[in-house]
Image (cartoon, rainbow, N blue to C red):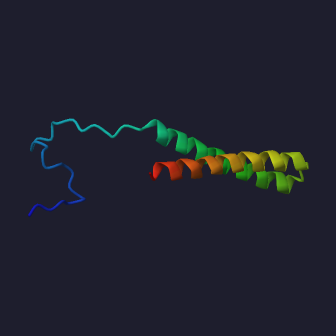
C-alpha cells in the first residue's frame, strides 16, 4: 500500500536527482474574476464604512451599497451556477 507524505519534497515519479521541472497549476479566468469581485466587495464595504465616519452624503452610501450588493450578488450567482 502506497502512502503519500505531505512533507515530501519530491513526487514519486521525480528522478532521484530532482532534475525534472515541476510546473505550477495554471490560474483560470474564473479564479481571476472571483478574486476581483471579492476585492470590489471589500473595497466598497470599507468605503461605505469610511463614508459613515466622514459624515458623507446619502448618495455616497447608496453608491457604495449598490456596488457591494452587485458584487456580492454576482459572487453568489457564480457560486450557485458552479455547483451544477
Q: Nearer the viewer, residue 11 or 77?
A: 77
Q: Quadrant of the N terminus?
A: bottom left
Question: What count of labels does the image hold?
Answer: 0
Residue 75, horizontal then vertical, whole percent? 58, 49
Q: Position of residue 78 (x, y in %)?
A: 54, 47
Residue projecting furthest to the front: 84
In the foreground, 13 or 18:
13
* Left or right, residue 18 beside residue 73: left
Residue beneath the point at 84% across and 56% down: 53
Q: Residue at x 70, y 49 (%)?
A: 68
The residue nearer to you, when weighing 68 against 4, is 68
**In which image quadrant can residue 15 be found?**
top left
Left or right of 29, for residue 59: right
For the point 24% across and 39% down, the residue is 22
Q: Is residue 24 above or below residue 11?
A: above
Q: Residue at x 77, y 55 (%)?
A: 49
Residue 40's x, y, as percent?
A: 65, 44
Q: Is residue 6 above or below residue 78?
A: below
Amino acid at each position: 500500500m502506497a502512502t503519500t507524505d505531505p512533507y515530501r519534497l519530491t513526487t514519486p515519479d521525480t528522478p532521484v536527482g530532482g532534475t525534472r521541472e515541476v510546473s505550477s497549476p495554471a490560474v483560470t479566468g474564473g479564479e481571476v474574476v472571483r478574486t476581483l469581485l471579492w476585492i470590489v466587495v471589500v473595497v466598497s464595504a470599507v468605503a461605505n464604512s469610511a463614508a459613515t465616519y466622514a459624515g458623507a452624503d446619502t448618495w455616497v452610501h447608496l453608491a457604495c451599497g449598490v456596488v457591494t450588493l452587485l458584487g456580492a450578488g454576482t459572487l453568489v450567482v457564480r457560486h450557485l451556477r458552479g455547483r451544477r
